[in-house]
Amino acid sequence: MSNTIYEWNFSDSKNRWKLWYILAISVILWLTIWWIFTKQYWLSFIVILLAWISLFIENNSSEIIEVKISELWIKIWDYFYDFKSIDNYSFIYSGENAIFLRLILNKKWIKKIDLKINNIICGDLKGILNQVANEEKWWELSFSEKIINLLKL
């Protein structure tokens, strides 16, 4: 087993306000009633099923994600990624603050992983990751990612 070079953890819990849940339930109920009224029962079933699945996934996910970097691999929660499976990485910024470390993988199903960081962690990781992977250019959040972060989805 190789030595851990760097490790950090971050909270992945969604702290949504009460109004967010009220609006989400209202939209789901409105769509369900509308689709039943227009006799599109399968759409009503799909929206209720998707709402239930998303609630199930949210309530059963881990709140604290632990990340460890070793000489040979990166461990994210309980999953190991060796450095051969990482094509490149980039730090995502919102203004001048680093908010994500984006790992671009060469795997078939999972192509990218975003890990929450701050400026201190970003400075520490630049020296470590430059030795094992290529860094892409300085990225900022796209418009859709800003909306997702704002709505806490």
Image (tube, grey):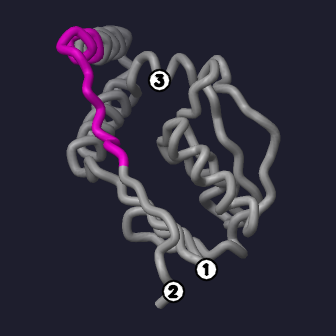
Q: Which residues are magenta?
A: 10-24
Residue 42 covered by magenta stretch: no
- Measured in 3D between alpha carbons, the distance from the residue under mark 3 to the one under mark 1, in whole angstroms, is 32 Å
Whether tag 2 and tag 1 are in contact, CB under 8 A, the answer is: yes
Instruction: Identify the element where label 1 is drawn.
Output: loop
- Residue 71: percent from the left, percent from the top? 60, 78
In the rendered image, residue 125, in percent from the top left (x then y), is placed at 60, 54
The stretch drawn in magenta includes residue 13 = yes
Residue 2 is situated, as x and y percent measured from the top left of the image, at 51, 86
Q: Secondary structure at mark 3?
A: helix
Q: Mark 2 to mark 1: distance in Å?
A: 7 Å
Q: Residue at x 33, y 9 (%)?
A: 34
Above or below: residue 122 compared with residue 129: above
The dot on residue 72 is: 1
Which residue is disc 2 drawn over?
Answer: 2
Q: What residue is shown with label 3?
A: 149
The kind of residue on which mark 1 rests is: Leu
The residue located at (66%, 41%) in the rendering is 91
